[in-house]
Amino acid sequence: MRNKSSEPSKVTRSKVWVAGHTHSDGRPVRPEFSETIVSEMGSGTISTSVRDDVVSQVLGKDKSGRIRGMGRGVTATKLAFLQARDSHVKKLEAQQAELINKINDLQNEVCGLSKRKKSDDVSISETSNANKVVTRCQLLDWCSMDDIVVGEGEFCSAEPMYKIDRIPLGLNAAAVIVNSVSKEDAYVWSPTTTIFSLGKAMGAKIAWPYDKIIFDSDNNSPTDNQTAVPSNKTCESCFVALIEMASSSPTQLAHVPFPPEPGGRSLTQEANEPQVPIHIVTDPLLLPADFLNPSPEKKLVIGFDCEGVDLCRHGKLCIMQIAFSNAIYLVDVIEGGEGLMKACKPALESTYITKVIHDCKRDSEALYFQFGIRLHNVVDTQIAYSLIEEQEGRRRPLDDYISFVSLLADPRYCGISYEEKEEVRVLMRQDPKFWTYRPMTELMIRAAADDVRFLLYLYHKMMGKLNQRSLWHLAVRGALYCRCLCCMNDADFADWPTVPPIPDNLKSEDQCLEEEILSVLDVPPGKMGRVIGRKGASILAIKEACNSAEILIGGAKGPPDKIFVIGPVKEVRKAEAILRGRMIDY
């Protein structure tokens, strides 16, 4: 019956029993069942419940655990479940059919709307093209102090939220289409992996500093809503740094404080400073020309830091961060390789570029042993902090040590919390190869930029506090710290630039001022334990006895058998004598 029925789900055992007990003309096969069959057929519906259907009425109630005529294993519970399931499936099928009809109706509606929109767009574009006024402009070299025209183009917009390749322009910037170029090697303001000079930007839309654009005539000048550029007053009080990356990583925002002069404004106004771009550098052409070609006419002060895996002579240098007054550059050493570092070498060794860094020792060691770069002319903020403490009558920190996080938290300098640094340290402990992954993640870019974005601010703050004597000590200690882990003996000093001598004015004013030197001591095998002592007690006692000298041990990163002593000549000789005494067998 199920095979022949148009609705197999409605074929029940009652229907099967009635069909089996009636003749073709409808007469009951057995007279005693005639009343039951007639009453069931007369009702017009046949019950689906097995408890009161025809079979139960004729043959009696089913035994527990089985149902007559339904085969083995069928119970009343299973049968009720199957009936409920079939009913639910039928409802779902009806809902599905209804939804399909609605989707088809929506598709037809969307097709109609899209056809209508295309026709509207054609008419609108024709009207806008007819009314569009091309604003022609000249592009001035943004790297030069003089007004040198390097190209011509069409002005598009200067709205801060106008985007080029999904990156907002920001303040004091404009979007232009380059039509002609008079200086092909001029640097673009926001380089990408394919466009880093103006010659490669022909026909492309690029960002350009708004104050380095000259419009051809007043009639062609852009309207107010096109040039939504804040006034100079607003620009001076605005301060957010936009990270523009030459990769597919998303845009980020960072605060980069650059006080205009020593003792500049407080960081409480951090959210109101001008924007600077931050670039990922894989090619030397992306770096400023004044950095690549140092000269006495264009002296620079930059923030500087390095990141890597176990940063030392044996580790791997991965990123070199450089902060200028108008941009931050993340030099990707992994992608750029030897060629990129070779291009940076003159700047890092130059006397004309001051490198502001916090704790230069391991950075200098990595640069020297991995790329042959002798880092020179550094201002180490760790040393500067120690000198200011001594100058103001406070006790100098042991080994001139203060962490970068603690320095930023000091209210005399920045007074800000740098909790993200600890988060990165935790990640580096979990995964020592954190800085090797490419492309760089948002966290890597933010962490790398954070390590240099305050250095120029600290530089100006500290320079305003240091006297002439402390400034000389700062220069000398910076030079000696850079080479201390790189020189294995006194003969190696000849390869490095000379240490700044005592200025004549300080010689006449301060008769007690001594030259400072670096001494390298070899520790015989098995003697380092005697020098350090139980829980470091011995080396701490030596440092206390020679407070004016800094005593550094290579430690796990190396060199493990060397001790470096930095300070005035007499204090260094005193420390040498005590250290050698610890190495003698009794």
Image (tube, rainbow, N blue to C red):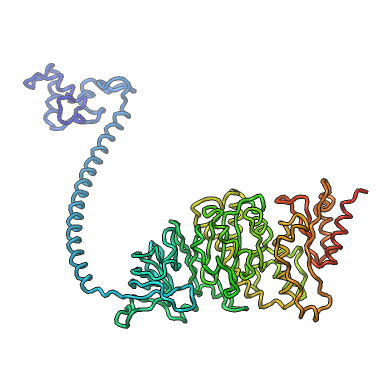
Q: With 235 as the anchor, is 9 left or right in this view? A: left
Is residue 449 positioned above or below 8 on the image?
A: below
Residue 112 in the image: x percent, y percent?
A: 17, 56
Q: Residue at x 69, y 66 (%)?
A: 382
338 on left or right of 543: left
**Rendered image quadrant of residue 192:** bottom left
Relative vertical location of residue 131 with respect to residue 419 in this rendering, above or below: below
Q: Position of residue 492 (x, y in %)?
A: 74, 57
Q: Residue furthest bottom?
A: 218
Total tally of numbered discs in the picture? 0
Q: Quadrant of the N terminus?
A: top left
Extreme residue in the top direction: 30
Residue 189, can we see it? no
Outermost residue toward the left in this view: 25
Quadrant assignment, res 403: bottom right
Q: Nearer the viewer, residue 539 or 321?
A: 321
What x and y, as percent, mark residue 578? 87, 58
213 left or right, relative to 307: left
Q: Camera-side residue: 4 or 211?
A: 211
User: Image check: 413 left or right of 218?
Assistant: right
In the image, residue 478 sits, relative to residue 586, either above or below, namely below
Q: Is residue 345 visible?
A: yes
Question: What residue is rendered at 53% in x and 66% in y?
Answer: 328
Picture layout, residue 233 above or below residue 2 = below
